[in-house]
Amino acid sequence: MSQATSSEAPQATPADTSPAAPSPSAHAQASGNLRGIIAMVAAVGFFSLMDALLKTLSASYPAMQVAALRGWAALPLVVLYVVWRREVGGLLKVRWPLHLLRGVINVSMLGLFAYALKELGLAEAYTLFFIAPLLITALSTVVLREKVRAAHWVAIALGMVGVVVALRPSQDAFFTLGALAVLGAACGYAVSAITGRVLTRTDSSASLVFWTTTLLALGAGALALPGWVGVDRAHWPLVAGLAVTGFLGQLAITEAFRHGQASVVAPFEYTALAWGMGLDWVLWQAVPGYSTLLGGAIIIGSGLYLVRQERTQAVVPP
């Protein structure tokens, strides 16, 4: 799978006034979180459409080649964006170790997710991928020092239960290659998101989008080259669709993690479930099973509870 900014992401600052009169810093944090949530909802929409294109292409091409096509197709748009922002001169002034780490993770993540989409329906893949927001919340407490209360760990545990339900509680389901690929992609996405949040404190959005796309194109392209399959002329419109949806999704998700707390904006990826089921039904006439819907409902419930807790903490003293 699937970034007008400030130079540094807003930091969590506990309110120090009464609940009736939240401090200016709490208001700023709440405003940043709202902006991040809107950007995340937009990103999910673009990435859902992109995933439908990935699923279509993965039926004809190797998973790593599909990942490479996603990177190379979006790169011209990213270059135009950087030139338009007049930030070409700042592309080399970045934190290289973290960018390279994200590059490796993103290549692996998208390759795994492209393979999973070949094996699973969109709704099933999304339901399993929904473990990622919960992992991001857990990592945010360690890496970003964001405050997450004990009630939030209950939400995370419920999310884990939802994943098990969606996998269907049988030994074979846990070791289905498609399901394991999604879970691996989700772990990679969580680490990439936290790393991106750290980078937004020093690097511009343009540099994040540029190097994320460039490293994906180069890394996935190199791995896909030995088994490269010629792209059929009928599939080039789909590749063009990858370019547009991938670029806009990457731009939106970068903005989401720049302005909002990771533990607040990440759960809004759950809106992808509706997209996944809708696209599955329209494009492939596939309807998810009851266990997938039940697991998704548990995960979404835990995520919405998590968001409510985070928003309360942003304006009310603990």
Image (cartoon, rainbow, N blue to C red):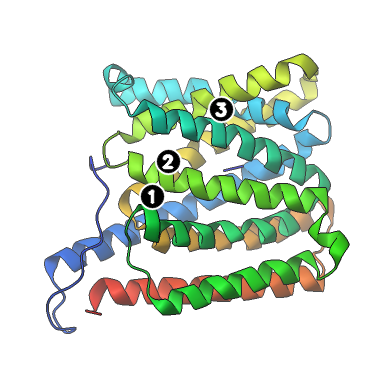
What is the quadrant of the N terminus in the image?
top right
**Residues at marks 2 and 1, CA–CA distance in whole angstroms:** 8 Å
**Residue furthest out toward the front:** 142
- State the image coordinates of residue 214 (x, y, percent, origin top left): 50, 23
Crowd band around label 1 with a 10 angstrom C-alpha radius: few (<14), some (14–19), many (20+): many
Cα–Cα gap, marks 2 and 3:
15 Å
Identify the residue shown where x is 73% and y is 53%: 122
Q: Are marks 2 and 1 in contact (CB under 8 Å)?
A: yes
Q: Position of residue 272 (x, y in %)?
A: 60, 58
Q: Is residue 37 visible?
A: no
Left or right: where 176 falls relative to 239 = right
Q: Which residue is mark 3?
A: 216
Residue under pointer 1: 257
Label placed on residue 55: none
Task: State left or right for residue 192 relative to residue 110.
Answer: left
The answer to whether residue 134 is above or below residue 240 is below
- Please, what secondary structure does the residue beneath circle 2 have? loop
Label 1 sits on a secondary structure element that is: helix
The part of the image, by quadrant, that contains residue 166 is: bottom right
- Residue 67: name its quadrant: top right
x and y percent of residue 215 in the render? 52, 24
Q: Nearer the viewer, residue 52 or 93?
A: 93
| Label 3 element class | helix
**First-in-chain label (2 vs 1):** 2
Residue flagged by tag 1: what amino acid is it? Phe
Q: At 74% across and 72% down in the image, what residue appears?
A: 165
Q: Residue at x 52, y 50 (%)?
A: 190
Label 3 amino acid? Leu
Q: Name the quarter where the C terminus is drawn.
A: bottom left
Location of mark 2 (residue): 3
Disc 2 vs disc 1: which is toward the camera? Answer: 1
Q: Which amino acid, mark 2?
A: Gln
